[in-house]
Image (spheres, rainbow, N blue to C red):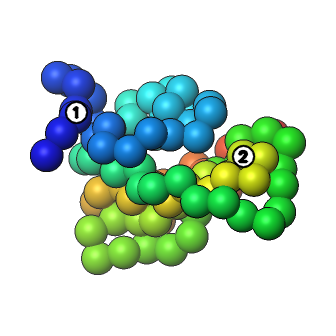
Amino acid sequence: MKHRAKNSKIKYEHSMIPGLRNFLEREIEPLEFVKSIFPGEIKRTKGTTSGLVVRFKYSTPTGAKLLAQKSSAVQEIFVVTTEPEILRKIIVSQQETN
């Protein structure tokens, strides 16, 4: 298993779509109730977006699943957290301000 900087909650096993690393480090990683962040594989999609869009998809037994999309690429992000509902509210409010 690879790839976690010494004091980072983000596991760097896969590459990330442009802008995602900065978003995770700035918005998600500092939250106390977030334990770990696991970006998944990057996949192609038919739709396009002009900038980075991060959406809350659903709660999981260990936290939450997010989707990040930019241009024609989409990436799953799994977040281990004790408070998935608070994370959902943060993601939704962040979407509304952009």
Q: Secondary structure at mark 2?
A: strand
Disc 2/disc 1 C-alpha distance (Å): 24 Å
Going by the image, does 49 lie left or right of 35?
right
Q: Circle 1 is placed at which residue position?
A: 4
Q: Residue at x 34, y 65 (%)?
A: 63
Q: Residue at x 27, y 68 (%)?
A: 62
25 lies above or below 79: above
Q: Residue at x 18, y 39 (%)?
A: 2
Examine the rendering and report whether any part of residue 3 can be seen. yes
Examine the rendering and report whether any part of residue 97 can be seen. no
Most foreground residue, 79 or 34: 79
Most foreground residue, 75 or 8: 75
Q: Quadrant of residue 75?
A: bottom right
Residue 10: x percent and y percent? 32, 38
Are there few (<14), some (14-19), or many (20+) residues within 10 Å of tag 2? many
Most foreground residue, 9 or 44: 44
33 lies above or below 2: below
The amino acid beneath tag 1 is Arg
Going by the image, does 87 lie left or right of 9?
right
| Mark with earlier residue (2, 1) | 1
Q: Residue at x 62, y 33 (%)?
A: 18
Residue 72: x percent and y percent? 75, 53
Quadrant containing the C terminus in the rendered view: top right
Going by the image, does 72 lie left or right of 61?
right
Q: Circle 2 is placed at which residue position?
A: 70
Q: Secondary structure at mark 1?
A: loop
Are there few (<14), some (14-19), or many (20+) residues within 10 Å of tag 1? some
Residue 6: x percent and y percent? 17, 23
